[in-house]
């Protein structure tokens, strides 16, 4: 594997930078705040004894809803070992992005679904044409944020994850002042071109952000098979 | 009197209305199922009989006819050619949308744009809107099949389906970036060109390979322009040229809507792979072969919203045109033509001024 200064447009730097995107969404994402990797400016990689590989990146990140862009420095460590361990990420100089205020919209959504409404959808997000009911968009964002937790923990130097679609998302009873959701997502892993499917149980509130409680990977389906629907 | 005029006017309006109905505008900014694409192809041939011919050149596993549109001004001479295929991978719906847009665009432009008219005179465009027809139709079946990638031929044991057509071509087949497990989305098939869809391109293009200047294969997603080869140990003999032209295309794309497309070999910017149609085409000595990976970068992925079809097609067209124009000008001596024109202009000017050349 390449060591030292890396070509920022080549895949090793790009894959490491995508992990930073998943980290940012996991920790700072919300129904109204979603991050995308915009560009990699520079990248360096080095082996860390026998324990793994460390990448240092200068990237720019894009907050998709407000359209704000900011340059960030990040470090991604891919541990080596018999058991596949999650990468570790550190980000700095990105603070402006985190300050983006989406609190009013988040509060409004939170209040609405805490008491008045219950979310239950069988329609995929997005639908086959890439479209979705605007009322569902914050929940699509929320599912991406929760899925980012999985994409982060599953990432290695040999993967590139994006979310392909939400098969369904169901709201469960509010618990400890957190909205609670059960969702079934389909991810896209670029290198293998596979569509891993996961079920997640997670909570969200404006104050606490997204907390993933349980995850379960669904087995690879064979022709004609369907996963059993969750209650 | 007024009544009669009124009635004639209404009659006139109805006639206009009727012919407008017959020619209902095809919406290039919506995704179309296969039957609509087939009807559109037939309609384009009907509307432009002097320049468009549908050519059937193979069959899919499920026995559907694979067709392309040959587009160009008819000439006596044997013409050079440009190849474009879309929809090798079923779920990449933006690709067939682009092929349809591309056809519409060149048919609209050549009548008013001298450069396009020249290119249509010197070259034929061979455009396959959907290659993997079985897969495409399957991806339209219901929301659970939308993300299908491969074709629909059954695997050796019968309990799994589909070969990745872009791993099935006879170009370092089965060496890297593939799986021999039928369940895998990068299953390369029983052997090189085991699949009828890959065979169709291989035989059609293969039997005319000296004619082709350019081979473009359209995919999504990732915003990339990939040059051969997918195998990390092989470098194309004209790598520098491919990168130069690719970068020019990416610059053209950027100018349209500000989207960045990365240019490079697959092993550099994406992943190593073998058996791709682009690699096979380059090995046939077709000099300019590119894989386009259209929008987006992963936000919507394969399910690119319909409101992005237009901008995506506009930028991709700009990129494709850059490559096609380069291919054309290199072959038809664009520079030499200009020099000749300048010489004639000079001679005529001298003649007019009365100078004696003898």
Image (tube, rainbow, N blue to C red):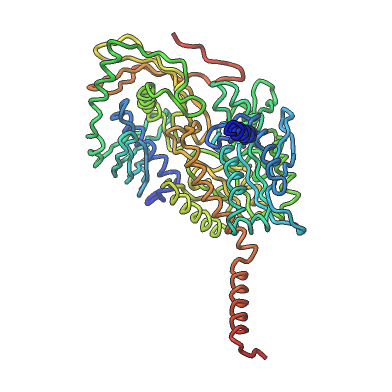
Q: Is residue B70 left or right of residue A58?
A: right
Residue at x 27% of width, y 18% of height: A110
Residue A223 in percent (x, y) is at 61, 20
A178 left or right, relative to B32? left
Left or right: residue B82 compared with residue A178: right
Q: Quadrant of the C terminus of chain B?
A: bottom right
**Which residue: 62% across, 71% down?**
B336
- Residue closer to the observer: B192 or B240: B240
Q: Position of residue B186 (x, y in %)?
A: 59, 34
Q: Residue at x 62, y 84 (%)?
A: B351
A25, A218: nearer the viewer:
A25
The answer to which quarter of the image holds residue B348 is bottom right
Q: Which of the two residues, B99 or B260, is positioned nearer the viewer here?
A: B99
Any part of residue B32 in sight = yes
Give percent across and percent down for residue B198: 69, 39
Is B21 placed above or below B76 here?
A: above
Instruction: Give the residue displayed 23% in from the left and 39% down from the top.
Output: A96
Please state the horizontal and vertical placement of residue A171, each as a whole percent of the image.
Answer: 36, 13
Q: In which quadrant is the N terminus of chain B drawn?
A: top right
**Is residue B187 visible from the viewing direction of this image?**
no
């Amino acid at each position: 594997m390449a060591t030292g200064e890396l070509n920022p447009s080549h895949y090793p730097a790009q894959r490491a930078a995508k992990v930073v995107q998943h980290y940012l969404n996991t920790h700072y994402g919300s129904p109204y705040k979603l991050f995308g990797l915009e560009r990699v400016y520079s990248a360096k990689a080095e082996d860390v004894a026998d324990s793994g590989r460390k990448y240092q990146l200068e990237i720019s990140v894009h907050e998709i809803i407000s359209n704000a862009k900011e340059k960030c420095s990040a470090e991604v460590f891919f541990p080596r070992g018999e058991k596949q361990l999650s990468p570790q990420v550190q980000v700095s100089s990105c603070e402006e992005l985190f300050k983006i205020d989406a609190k009013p919209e988040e509060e409004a959504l939170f209040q609405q679904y805490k008491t008045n409404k219950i979310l239950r959808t069988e329609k995929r997000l997005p639908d086959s044409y890439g479209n979705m009911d605007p009322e569902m968009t914050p929940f699509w964002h929320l599912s991406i944020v929760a899925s980012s937790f999985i994409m982060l923990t599953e990432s290695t130097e040999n993967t590139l994850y994006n979310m392909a679609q939400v098969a369904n998302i169901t709201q469960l009873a509010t618990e400890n002042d957190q909205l609670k959701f059960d969702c079934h997502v389909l991810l896209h892993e670029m290198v293998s071109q596979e569509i891993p499917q996961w079920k997640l149980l997670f909570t969200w509130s404006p104050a606490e952000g997204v907390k993933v409680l349980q995850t379960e990977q669904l087995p690879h389906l064979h022709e004609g098979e369907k996963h059993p629907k969750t209650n | 009197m007024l009544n009669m005029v009124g009635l004639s006017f209404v009659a006139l309006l109805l006639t206009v209305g009727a012919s407008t109905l017959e020619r209902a505008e095809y919406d290039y900014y919506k995704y179309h199922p296969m039957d609509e694409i087939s009807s559109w192809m037939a309609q384009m041939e009907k509307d432009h009989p002097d320049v468009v011919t549908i050519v059937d050149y193979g069959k899919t596993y499920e026995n559907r006819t694979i067709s392309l549109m040959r587009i160009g001004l008819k000439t006596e001479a044997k013409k050079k050619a440009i190849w474009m295929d879309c929809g090798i991978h079923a779920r990449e719906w933006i690709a067939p949308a682009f092929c349809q847009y591309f056809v519409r665009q060149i048919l609209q432009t050549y009548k008013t744009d001298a450069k396009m008219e020249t290119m249509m005179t010197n070259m034929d465009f061979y455009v396959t809107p959907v290659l993997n027809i079985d897969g495409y139709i399957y991806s339209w079946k219901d929301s659970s099949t939308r993300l299908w990638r491969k074709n629909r031929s059954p695997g050796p044991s019968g309990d799994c389906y589909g070969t990745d057509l872009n791993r099935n071509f006879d170009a370092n087949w089965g060496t890297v970036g593939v799986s021999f497990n039928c369940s895998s989305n990068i299953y390369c098939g029983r052997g090189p060109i085991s699949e009828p869809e890959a065979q169709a391109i291989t035989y059609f293009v293969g039997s005319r390979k000296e004619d082709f200047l350019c081979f473009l294969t359209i995919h999504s997603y990732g915003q990339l322009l990939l040059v051969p080869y997918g195998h990390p140990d092989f470098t194309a003999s004209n790598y520098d040229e491919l990168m130069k032209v690719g970068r020019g295309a990416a610059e053209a794309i950027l100018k349209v809507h500000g989207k960045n497309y990365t240019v490079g070999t697959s092993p550099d910017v994406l992943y190593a792979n073998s058996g791709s149609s682009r690699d096979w085409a380059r090995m046939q000595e077709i000099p300019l072969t590119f894989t386009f990976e259209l929008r987006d970068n992963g936000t919507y992925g394969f399910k690119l919203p319909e409101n992005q079809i237009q901008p995506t097609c506009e930028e991709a067209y700009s990129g494709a045109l850059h490559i096609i124009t380069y291919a054309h000008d290199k072959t038809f001596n664009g520079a030499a033509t200009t020099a000749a024109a300048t010489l004639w202009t000079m001679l005529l000017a001298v003649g007019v001024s009365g100078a004696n050349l003898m």
